Amino acid sequence: MVAYFTVILMACNSNKSQSQPQDTTGNATLPAPGESKTSYSKVIGWPEGKTPIAPAGFNVTKYAGSLTNPRWIYIAPNGDVFVAQATTESKKIVDVISGKSKSQNLGDSPNSIVLFRDTNKDGKPDVSKVFLSGLNRPFGMLIIGNSFYVANTDGVWMYPYKEGQEEMTSAGKKILDLPAGGYNNHWTRNLIASSNNSKIYVSVGSGSNVAEHGMQNEVRRANILEINPDGSGERVYASGLRNPVGMAWNPTSKVLWTAVNERDELGDDLVPDYITGVKDGGFYGWPFSYFGQHEDPRRAGENPELVKKAIVPDVALGAHTASLGLAFYNQTSFPEKYRNGAFIGQHGSWNRSTLAGYKVAFVPFKDGKPAGKLEDFLTGFIVEKGGNDVYGRPVAVAVTPDGALLVADDAGNTIWRVAAK
């Protein structure tokens, strides 16, 4: 496996006396803004026979390997597993302070969706086929009736679909244009349908860190959009969400939740990524404030009336963890403590003096609300504590009909399966 560096360069100092706020009430105690430093992760790949580490009582196995940057997972109503393979928009990562670029050998984006099917229900797919290719950095996927939807970085496409088909042979049509690309990895566009399939929600990340290029370049961005299944009727469902990626319906409260990747360059421990229930019409601060009414010093005084309306997120997940994946555990094979709780795929930091994230975390829920502290669930991605070598980087998390948890490891080119013993 070819190793590569996650590299975004900034020459700054770190305030190491700060502690990572991790809280499940939304009332995280935040440090004052400070200077930032980067720590690069070097992906070395998984040695033969080595897997991530789950708590006692669970088995971790390789569900699928030899993929090419598997970024997102969608599980169809019939249990088929679709995996979107895509990479960032450029082979160069740009230092957001100096403007200088550094080569990063990511290779060309595979731009495809792979289908996996486990026909004998043994936890291993016996069907593996390229379902759809020739896309433009696909991410979110969705099936409604006889339609298969794909969220490319520049728009939503709809294809005719029949349950169980193993390859897309029909031409699709673009039903919604979206602003393409974005800061760092903000090219991802996710999809989720309402319970009655009458609406589709589309997540669109910001085009910058804190609108440093002007708000005119952020139109229809840092939002969750709502559309009809034919692409019409677009409206902003929620705004001020810097990079909302994972979206999931809480199985108890039926509220839409999202995982949000927050801003950079305010120090090791600002700003916490978070998951939150999403209020229709809600504003969540970006770019003017963070975690409620904490004004971003780079945008201080610009929009005080809007800042007053900023909603405090529900659960702080730690700064720079790149919390992207989100799935509620709606099955019964895991122990009771996990039922209806949230799993979060933390892709891992670059804007910290030491690595943070690089794991799947868990937050327990009760009666539709967070009911305990954030805890580690799937670890072992970092080779050695305090070091920068990593075996892989988890992103998407998805719960299968048989109650297992699938985890997309894009840097490790693997889908992991976690099942209760």
Image (spheres, helix red, strand yellow):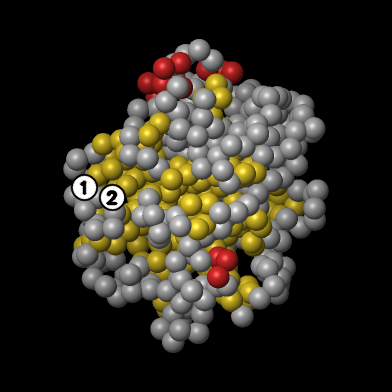
Residue sitting at x 28%, y 40%? 177
Residue at the disc numbered 1: 228
Q: Which mark is residue 99?
A: none
Residue sitting at x 23%, y 71%? 162
Residue sitting at x 54%, y 32%? 291
- The crowd level at tag 1 (other Cα within 10 Å; few <14, some 14-19, many 20+) is some
Q: Is residue 149 something that shows in the picture?
A: no
Residue at the disc numbered 2: 200
Q: Secondary structure at mark 2?
A: strand
Q: Secondary structure at mark 1?
A: loop
Q: Position of residue 304 (x, y in %)?
A: 46, 16
Residue closer to the observer: 213 or 321: 321
Residue 19 horizontal side relative to residue 234, left or right: right
Q: Position of residue 289 (x, y in %)?
A: 51, 25
Residue 216 horizontal side relative to residue 86, left or right: left
- The image quadrant that residue 98 belongs to is top right
